[in-house]
Image (spheres, grey):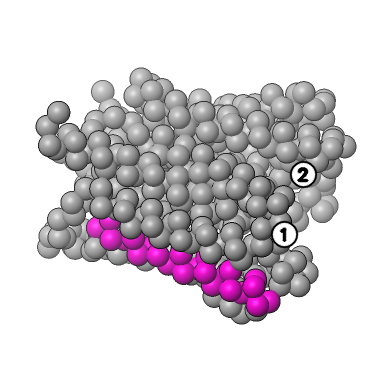
Amino acid sequence: MTDDRRRLEAAKVAVGITFAINGLGFAGWFARVPAVREDLGLSSAGLGLLLLCLSGAAIAAIPLAGPLVQRLGPARSVLIGSMAVVLGLLGLACGTMFGSVPLAGVGLMLLGVGNSTWDVAMNVEGADVERRLGRTLMPRFHAGFSLGTVAGAGVSAAAAAIGVALSTQLFLMAALAAIVMTLTVRRFLPHAPATAEQRTAGRVRDAWREPRTLLIGVIMLGFGFTEGAANDWLAIGLVDGYHATETVGAIGFGFFVVAMTLGRLFGGSAIERWGRVTVLRATAVSALLGLLLAVSGIGVPVVLVGALLWGAGASLGFPIGMSAAADDPLRAAIRVSVAGSIGYAAFLAGPPLIGVLAEHFGVLRALLVVLVAIGLGLAASAAARPLPIGRAARDEPVATP
């Protein structure tokens, strides 16, 4: 194995670890949101406003992450983002320890800004490794994130069960993230300083005018909404719509998460064989069938089958979108940040929209709004076609051989 190949394989492992730690850090505190509410003495409405500090900061930071990654490179940007997350965890820990809502809010804002920077940078690095190795790796990287979230949720459940204070858990998670990420980014690929051409090409306002980049964002928006709706409302749909127990609701959510993780672990082979567009369309159909089974009202076993199809259908839209946005190395960071800004809007707008609809029509009927999201992802799917070699700077998608 040549030195270049060794460097690429080391970078591949480093990116996988980066995705996993990102997922671990996110789910490791998010799974204990009820403890945040209790420690701070908040109402449900107050908790919602507090969490808005996180989501608002995250959405605002995504467009800024692209220029940062282009200027400093993915390794430094991931390190900056992860250290901001570490500071955010420490701020949230101190806020819950001392019962200070403003301190917790500042911590969540740092978490949001840091996570957006971390997210864009690790996706740009992942796309670069994927491109240089000539293999479809982005779904597996995102599977690493999913596995990290499962591990984070498990750690939080265990900590809550044995009575570990939330602040103690957050301090430990911050220390773990700081140590692991400081060591991991050293394995990233070397970053060459931006050339004059890159600085000219890498303007955010120009990327917002590119039809292909915007359509890739729509793909990510549609599939992100499809994923987020199940994350937030599938278990509640089982409990409220089918009068199932909370245990059954958790099992249904588990079916969805397992199917989504497996889809990301093994979806790369399907993409290499049939192409991005065909796989996107097939997964959209799978998500559609799964959703219809989940809201059919027939019975819990049918919902569990639906959860599997829904999870598989939601699994590949986001990683395919990230790969497509990064097709042109010259503009990868900017386009990933722009497409990501559109895509992540789903996670900001989705939960409250479905909540409002559920108040009037019930959870199962409210979930039918996901049909619109699936339709958007399906309609824009052609934009994910890889840009042909030698024409990477063109905006319009061109069919591959």
Residue 155 position (above or below residue 29): above
Residue 283 position (above or below residue 81): above
Extreme residue toward the right, this view: 243
Say which amino acid is labelled 2: Ile
Say which amino acid is labelled 1: Pro
Is 297 in front, or is 397?
A: 297
Give, as a single range, the part of the protein colored magenta.
73-99
- The answer to the question of whether label 1 and label 2 lie on touching residues, with beta carbons closer than 8 A, is no
Would you say residue 288 is visible in this rendering? no
Task: Identify the residue at image location x=29%, y=29%.
Answer: 135
Is 366 in front, or is 100?
A: 100
Residue on which disc 2 sits: 236
Secondary structure type for disc 1 = helix
The picture places residue 298, in percent across and down from the top left corner, at 82, 25
Corner quadrant of residue 196: bottom left
**Left or right: 293 with respect to 51?**
right
